[in-house]
Amino acid sequence: MTDRQFKLLDAIIKEFIENSEAVGSVTLVKKYKLPISSATIRNEMAELMRLGFLAKEHLSSGRVPTTLAYKKLVEQVFNDELELKVALASTIRQELYSVRFDIDEMIYRALQIIFEESGNVGFAILGKRIYHFGLSRIPNLPEYKQVEGLCNLIYVMEDNLMLKEILEEYEETGETRVIFGEDLKMDIFKNMVIIYSPVIIYESKKVYIGLIGSQRLDYAKVIPLVRLVARSVTEGIAGW
């Protein structure tokens, strides 16, 4: 992929994340002030589609990012080691530290933060117990206005053993992990993504904390978000 193609793909992903609609060349020229013509953008979009980074939905002339495109973006986020803005990071640390002596309250507060900052369901798994926050508000997202997508998400959140087994399979993939539903080869995870971090608490018990939902996410924000929340929980527990 050329540098120009990557910048174009990045703009398409940003536009799709914001509006959840197929992106056309005219929109890109006007909104992102790209120094190339609509014709050149269309040619580059056709090449990105050939490479598997874009797809065409229905009769629309626009394109939407594929899972491969999101993976490319995630790779860039990890390579750049992006962090949250200092003010937001400080607020999150202080909020979680203030409830550090109550593990249940700290987990629920952590999940509330994840939901409020990402717009997707925050979840945690501790032993056989699953915590979640934001599930009742998810139907506001375009992806979950259809019954099938919403039912799939609810089903996943109710089956904590299945979810825990999936998270444990990615045990050696780093501090913060990203699992795309497409890689799980299960229809129920179609168009979903799971971003999470493991946290060790008292008596060496492990908690998985993260978010699950639509892969139409601002990865440059949510990956550092999940990482920071997990670190803040770890730091709070260490002060016991």
Image (tube, rainbow, N blue to C red):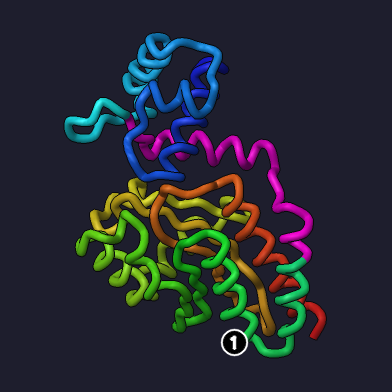
Determine which residue is flagged by label 1. Answer: 104
Q: Name the magenta segment's main secondary structure.
A: helix
Residue 35 location, quadrant:
top right
Residue 54: x %, y % from top left? 35, 29
Q: Residue at x 68, y 37 (%)?
A: 80
Q: Residue furthest bottom?
A: 102
Left or right of 106 on screen, residue 144: left
Q: Which residue is at a point 42% across and 10% down the rendered structure image?
A: 40
How many dots with numbers?
A: 1
**Viewer-closest of 46 and 34:** 34
Horizontal arrangement in the rendering, residue 99 relative to residue 218 (left or right): right
The amino acid type found where label 1 is placed reads: Asp
The residue at 56%/37% (across/down) is 75
Q: What is the magenta range?
A: 63-90
Check the image and name the residue furthest to the left. Answer: 59
Query: Is 186 situated above or below 29?
Result: below
* Spot occupied by residue 143 in the image (x, y as percentages of width and height): 31, 55
Is residue 148 shown left or right of residue 137?
Answer: left
- Residue 182 x %, y %: 33, 47
Does the segment drawn in magenta span residue 31?
no
- In the image, residue 85 lies in the stretch drawn in magenta: yes
Q: Position of residue 199 (x, y in %)?
A: 64, 70
How many C-alpha atoms fall within 10 Å of the one at disc 1: few (<14), some, or many (≥20)?
few
Looking at the figure, which quarter contains the C terminus? bottom right
The foreground one among 144 and 165 is 144
**Element type where label 1 sits in the image:** helix
Q: Along the line of sight, which residue is nearer the eye, 216 or 20?
A: 20
- Report the residue that reaches farthest toward the front: 30
Q: Residue at x 44, y 44 (%)?
A: 17
